[in-house]
Image (cartoon, grey):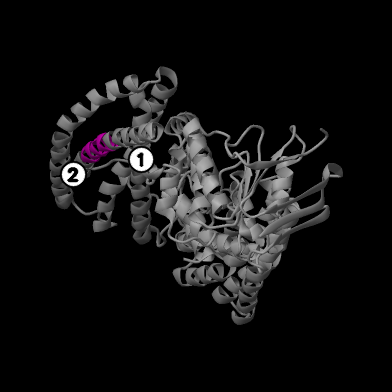
Amino acid sequence: MQLTAENLACSRGGREVFAGVNFSMPGGEALVVTGRNGAGKSSLLRMLAGLISISAGRLALTGAENDATLAEQSHYLGHQDAVKPSLSVSENLRFWAEFLGGRDAIGAALEAVDLVPLADLPAAYLSAGQRRRLSIARLVAVQRPVWLLDEPTSALDVPSQKRLAELMRGHLVGGGMIVAAAHGPIGLERARELKLGPA
Amino acid sequence: MSAFTALLARDMRIAIRVGGGALMGALFFLIVVTMMPFAIGPDLALLARIGPAILWLGALLASLLALDRLFATDHDDGSLDLLMMGRMPLELAIAAKGIAHWLTTGLPLVLITPVLGLMLNVELGAMGWVSLTLLAGTPALTFIGLIGAALSVALRRGGLLLAVLVLPLTIPVLIFGVAAANAAIVGPAPFGPPFTILCALSLASFVLGPIAAAAALRHGLE
Amino acid sequence: MAVIDLANPTRFLAVVNRVLPWLMAATILAFAFGLARVMYAPDDYQQGATVKIMFLHVPAAWLGMMGWGVMTVAALGTLVWRHPLADVAGKAAAPIGAAFTFICLVTGSLWGRPMWGTYWVWDARLTSVLVLFLLYLGVLALYWTAEDPGRGSRAAAILALVGAVNIPIIKFSVEWWNTLHQPASIIRSGGSAIDPSILMPLLIMAGAFTLLFFTLHLAAMRNEILRRRVRSMRLMQASRA
C-alpha cells in the first residue's frame, strides 16, 4: 500500500494556500504535517479526505482496495466531533459504525477509549474531551487503512493522549497509515514530518 | 443494518428526541391555519369554500420552514463531512434524510389536517380528499425543499433564504394539490388528472431533489 | 450550587409526599359528589341533556386560565426572586394548563355540534380559548427545545409574562374582530341568570377540577424535581468517568 502526493496544490478563493507538496508513504508509516497557522494543514487533510478538490497535482493510493476512492478508505477526524447531543454515547457510535459499514465492534471500541461506563448517557452530558474520545472510537469500530487526524490530541488529557497514541501504534503495526496535522508531538516515535509553508 | 437505514433511523430518532423538531412543523401548521380566519373573517361558508386552499398553503409553509436546519446541524457538528466521505453515494444519504424528515414532519401535517379542516368547516368527507392530496403532495414539498436546505447551508445562510429559493419551485405542487382537492369536493373537473400529476411531481422530486441537493452540497462546501 | 438547589426541594418533596394522598382522596370525593349532583341537575328545556357538557367545559376553561395564572406567578418567582422551586412550578403547570384548555376546546366543540350544527364556530370566546391553547403550545415547545433546563425555564418565564400581559389584549381584539363580522349562524348560549339547580353542581365541579389541578401540579412538580436530580446525577457520573 502506498500513498503518493505529487506536486499537490491548494487554492481557496483565489488565494494559494500551499503548492508543490510531495510525499510518498508506505503502509505502517505515519506522517505528521506541521506548519504555522494558515499554512494549510487542515486543508491538506480535507483534500486527502476528498472534501475539497485538488487544485493541481496528483494524489493516489495504490495497493489497497482498488474500487474504492481514497476518501472511502479513510477515517477523517476533523475539528468537530460529529456527535449528536440527543443520542446516547453508544447510539452515536453505533450509527457511525453502521453508516461506515463496520462490524459489531462497538463494545470493543468504547472499551478502547474508556467510555464504557458512559455508554447509555446522552452525549449532551459529555465534556469536550469525552466527545473527542467518542469520535476516536469510530476509528476503532470500523476498519479503514488510512487515518486522517486533524490535531487529534486537542481537548484530550494526558491519559487519553497516551491511549490514543497506543491506538495509533496498533493501527501502524497492522499496516495502516496515519496522516496527522499537529502543532506539538502526538506521541508517535517514528513519524516523518512534513512542514507546510515557508520555513 | 445498511448505511441507508442507519441514517434514516438516526434522523428519525433525533427528530423525536428532546430538542428535535418533529412536532414543530405541525404546530406551525396549526397556528398558520388559525391565523387565516382572523384575516378573512369568521364566515363559515367562506371558510369552507377556501378551506382546502388554506390547508395547502399552511402545509406548504410548514414543511418548508421546518427544513431550515436539515443539513445545517450536520454541517455544524462535522457529521456532514463524514456523510460526504461515506461509501454510500451522497444522493442516497440525502434521500434517507429527506424520507426521515418527511416521516417526522410531513406525515404529522397530513395527520392533523382533518382536525384543522373541522375548524375551517370543511366537511368530513371532503377532508379525506384534502388529506389524500396532502399525503401525495407533501413528499414533493420536502424533496424540493431539500435543494433549498442544501443551498442555504452551502451559502451559510438560513431561514428566509430557503423559502425565497424554494417557494417558486413549489408552485406546480400547490396548483395541482389544490386543484385535485377542489375537484374532489366541488367538481366539476375530474379528480384523476390533477391528482396523477401531483403524484408524478412527488415521484420526480424524489429523484431530482436529492441529486440537486447533493450537487449543491458538493460544490458549495469546498 | 448543588447544595442550595437541593436543600429547599428536598423539604418540598417530603411535604408533597405527605400531602399528595390526601389531596388525591379529596379530589376523588369532590368529583364523586359533583358528578352525582350533575346527574340530578335538570336538563335544559332547549338543549336537553347536552347541557351537561357545560359541567366539564366551563371548569376546564377556568382551570385553563388559572394554569396561566400559576405560570405567571411562577415566572415572577423565577425571574425576580430566583426561587429554585418557581421554575419547577412553572414548568409543571404548563402541560396541565394546556390539557385543561384542550379539554375545554374539545368539549366546546362537542357541545357546539348539537347547538350550532357544526363542530367549530369562530365565536369570540371559543377563539380566545384556542389562542390561549396556542400560547400554551408555544411554551411547551420552548421547554421541549431547550436542552438546558435552567435556560429553558427562564425563557419560558419571560414568555409566560409576555403572555399574561397579552392575553387580555388578545381577548379584547378577538371580541372586536368577532363583532365586526358577526356571522348569523351563532346562537348565544345560556340566559343571563343561571338557575341555582345548575349553579351549585357547576361550582362543586369547579372545586373538584381545582383540586385535580393542584393534585396533578404537585405530582408533576415532584416528577420534575426527581427528573432534574436524575439529570444532575448523570452529569456527575459523566464528569467522574
Q: Secondary structure at mark 2?
A: helix
Q: Nearer the viewer, mark 1 or mark 2?
A: 1
Circle on res. C197: 2
Residue B63 placed where, x, y %? 58, 57
Q: Secondary structure at mark 1?
A: helix
Residue underneath mark 1: C97
Task: In this rendered view, identify the residue nearer to me: B32 or B214.
Answer: B214
Can see residue C99?
A: yes
Q: Is residue C217 magenta?
A: yes
Task: In this rendered view, identify the residue nearer to me: A24 or B206.
Answer: A24
Q: Amino acid at mark 1?
A: Gly
Q: Residue at x 47, y 38 (%)?
A: A130
Instruction: Using the image, determine if residue B137 lies above or below residue C101.
Output: below
Q: Residue at x 48, y 71 (%)?
A: B128
Q: Amino acid at mark 2?
A: Ser
Instruction: Give the extent of the magenta segment.
Output: C207-220
Task: In this rendered view, identify the residue nearer to me: A13 or B45.
Answer: A13
Q: Residues within 10 Å of mark 2 (few under 14, many from 20)?
A: few
